[in-house]
């Protein structure tokens, strides 16, 4: 009888734990997505890497072009988003769109080329640092990082330790990589950055959940404009480089506004062969108009093509002609909303068979 009672108690405790985990998971999901239509004018985030390193066109921007881009932002009377207030302002509707500058990796060319310009003009930015390459050839050292970190318009972000393809690691090695960087940041800066950037913009559901428990915000590398309904741990950024940074394209994208949605499935952004192509379902809010004017393009099959869309009231399903090829599958959707161009994108990491 005693053993039976003990077993019954153990079962009850296990059920209670499972129930608590379920509600905790749901509450995290709710916290990451406001889930009401805000008509937020949003924050458009730009991502840069190298400056005046012309032999790396896929990650480089020429300084004369970069300066022209910053001037375009000023001429359009958009304000630069101060990263020191980014977290506290996230859940508040922006009456006027802001532009957030982010720089990944801490290349030396940022310090020698872009930093003097940003410092002179006091343009706010986030500099995401991977700790392992610091001080190596082509990268900034800790004294240079500390010099920037002291400025009230600059913020240092966490970008892992090795900057390897973290999504290819097992979960324990991924956690170890983040913890090593965290320890180094604590040792070198005296604190751990609150904002994270996924290397290559790649993350699994496990990675995202871990990051959400250890950071306040996380950025990917899929395009789009941040609004209060976007998940705080997979925020979009427009990559800017020589190929996609010409001034004509820049003038177009800088005028995009958020295309809000209530939910986007699947949440898992790491696809195996059995999940490829994914079933992508986007749910919009009842207040949103002109939803059926959306156009989406995807690179399934290795080429960019217009996607086939199915609408059921405020729900959109995106069909793909072929599987996405390794390593990344991308979807970009835009909407002409009575003359205002709205945009969102998403990215999947494709496992090799």
Image: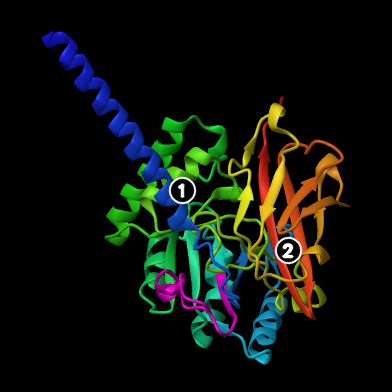
Q: For this view, does 2 lie left or right of residue 7?
A: left
- Using a 10 Å C-alpha cutoff, classify the residue at mark 2 as few (fewer than 14 neighbours), some (14 to 19) or many (20 or more): few
Q: Residue 327 placed where, x, y %?
A: 71, 39
Which quadrant, please, contains the C terminus?
top right
Q: Residue 144 placed where, x, y %?
A: 42, 67
Say whether residue 267 is visible: yes
Quarter where residue 110 is shown: bottom right
Out of 314 and 31, give the one closest to the viewer: 314
- Residue under the point 44% across and 75% down: 89
What separation in Å lies between label 1 and label 2 (alpha carbons)?
26 Å
Mark sitting earlier along the chain (1/2): 2
* Residue 27 painted magenta: no
Query: Against 166, is 89 above or below?
Result: below
Say whether residue 130 is visible: no
In the rendered image, the residue lying farthest to the left is 2
Q: Residue 153 placed where, x, y %?
A: 43, 79
Classify mark 1: helix, strand or loop. Answer: loop
- Residue under the point 29% across and 33% down: 17
Quarter where residue 230 is shown: bottom right
Quarter where residue 336 is shown: bottom right
Q: Residue 252 placed where, x, y %?
A: 78, 76
Q: Which residue lies under the disc numbered 1?
A: 160
Out of 288 and 122, give the one closest to the viewer: 288
- Using a 10 Å C-alpha cutoff, classify the residue at mark 1 as few (fewer than 14 neighbours), some (14 to 19) or many (20 or more): many
- Residue under the point 46% across and 55% down: 30
Q: Which residues are magenta?
A: 81-101
| Mark 1 vs 2: CB contact within 8 A | no
Q: Which residue lies under the disc numbered 2?
A: 54
- Residue under the point 42% across and 40% down: 177
């Amino acid at each position: 009888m005693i053993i039976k009672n003990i077993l019954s108690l153990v079962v009850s405790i296990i059920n209670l734990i499972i129930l608590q985990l379920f509600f905790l998971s749901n509450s995290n999901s709710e916290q990451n997505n406001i889930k009401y239509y805000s008509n937020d004018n949003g924050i458009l985030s730009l991502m840069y890497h190298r400056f005046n390193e012309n032999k790396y066109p896929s990650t480089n921007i020429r300084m004369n072009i970069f300066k022209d881009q910053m001037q375009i932002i000023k001429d359009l009377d958009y304000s630069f988003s101060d990263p020191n207030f980014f977290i506290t302002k996230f859940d508040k509707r922006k009456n006027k769109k802001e532009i957030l500058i982010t720089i990944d990796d801490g290349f030396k060319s940022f310090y020698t080329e872009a930093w003097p310009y940003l410092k002179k003009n006091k343009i706010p930015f986030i500099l995401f640092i991977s700790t392992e390459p610091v001080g190596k050839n082509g990268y900034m050292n800790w004294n240079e990082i500390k010099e920037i970190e002291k400025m009230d318009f600059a913020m240092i972000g966490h970008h892992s330790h090795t900057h390897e393809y973290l999504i290819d690691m097992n979960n324990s090695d991924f956690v170890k990589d983040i913890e090593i960087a965290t320890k180094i940041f604590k040792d070198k800066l005296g604190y751990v950055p609150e904002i994270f950037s996924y290397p290559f913009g790649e993350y699994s559901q496990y990675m995202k959940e871990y990051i959400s428990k250890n950071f306040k915000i996380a950025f990917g590398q899929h395009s789009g404009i941040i609004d209060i309904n976007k998940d705080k741990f997979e925020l979009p950024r427009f990559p800017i480089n020589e190929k996609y940074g010409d001034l004509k394209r820049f003038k177009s994208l800088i005028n995009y506004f958020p295309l809000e949605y209530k939910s986007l499935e699947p949440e898992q952004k790491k696809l195996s062969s059995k999940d490829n192509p994914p079933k992508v379902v986007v749910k919009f809010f009842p207040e949103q108009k002109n939803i059926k004017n959306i156009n989406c393009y995807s690179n399934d099959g290795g080429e960019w093509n217009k996607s086939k869309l199915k609408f059921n009231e405020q729900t959109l399903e995106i069909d793909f002609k072929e599987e996405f090829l390794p390593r990344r599958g991308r979807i970009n959707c835009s909407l002409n909303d009575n003359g205002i161009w709205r945009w969102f994108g998403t990215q999947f990491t494709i496992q090799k068979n």
